[in-house]
């Protein structure tokens, strides 16, 4: 499959705990359930969706760097690294395709330190506060941006 038909979904720290972690904030869907749904939506739209999750900042950066020539768009939920990682932001700057940031919770309605995202500086758009549906909106947005170019 070529670059023009692939989209990458990157999830950061603690998102592997979805379904068990603070259900009142993040809901009951597991990351695997979300990924499975995204892969199906992608297939239905003639896109291959690859998913990656890591709790390690350097692994996320390596994944972004490897994606430059492989993917047409990126969806990223950098988790807590959104608020701290200039390095992830810098890695995303090099990517030429559309990037959509996702947060399951409304980061602006939570603790003050969560109100800022370095990732937001380099993305085409951000979706927050819509739970697992935010990923679907992000995928549809990426597909729209890709087909509109």
Image: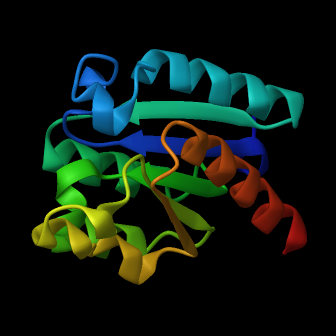
Q: Which residue shows up at 62% across the image and 68% down it? A: 98
Q: Is residue 76 above or below residue 118?
A: above
Taking the image as shown, residue 18 lies to the left or right of residue 50, namely left
Taking the image as shown, residue 28 lies to the left or right of residue 124, namely left
Residue 80, x across and y down, in percent: 18, 53
Taking the image as shown, residue 97 lies to the left or right of residue 66, namely right
**Considering the image in quadrants, where does the C terminus appear?**
bottom right
Q: Nearer the viewer, residue 32 or 24?
A: 24
Q: Which residue shows up at 24% across the image and 34% down it? A: 54
Residue 120, x across and y down, in percent: 39, 75
Residue 61, x across and y down, in percent: 26, 54
The image's colouring method is rainbow
Residue 84 visible within the image: no
Q: Which residue shows up at 42% across the image and 23% down it? A: 31
Q: Is residue 111 above or below residue 10?
A: below
**Considering the image in quadrants, where does the N terminus appear?**
top right
Taking the image as shown, residue 110 lies to the left or right of residue 65, namely left
Residue 63 visible within the image: yes
Q: Is residue 3 above or below residue 23?
A: below
Q: Nearer the viewer, residue 135 or 49?
A: 135
The image shows a total of numbered marks equal to 0
Q: Quadrant of residue 53?
A: top left
Q: Nearer the viewer, residue 62 or 138?
A: 138
Residue 35, x across and y down, in percent: 54, 25
Q: Which residue shows up at 65% across the image and 23% down it? A: 37
């Amino acid at each position: 499959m070529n670059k023009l038909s692939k989209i990458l979904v990157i999830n950061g720290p603690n998102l592997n705990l979805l379904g068990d972690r603070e259900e009142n904030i993040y809901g009951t869907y597991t990351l695997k359930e979300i990924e499975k749904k995204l892969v199906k939506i992608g297939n239905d739209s003639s896109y291959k969706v690859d998913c990656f999750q890591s709790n390690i900042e350097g692994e996320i950066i390596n994944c972004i760097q490897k994606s430059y020539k492989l993917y047409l768009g990126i969806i990223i939920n950098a988790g807590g690294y959104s608020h701290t990682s200039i390095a992830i932001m810098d890695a995303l700057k090099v990517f030429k395709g559309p990037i959509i940031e996702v947060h399951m919770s409304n980061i602006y309605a939570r603790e003050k330190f969560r109100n800022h995202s370095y990732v937001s500086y380099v993305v085409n758009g951000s979706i927050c506060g819509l739970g697992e549906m935010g990923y679907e909106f992000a995928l549809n947005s990426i597909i729209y941006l890709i087909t509109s170019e």
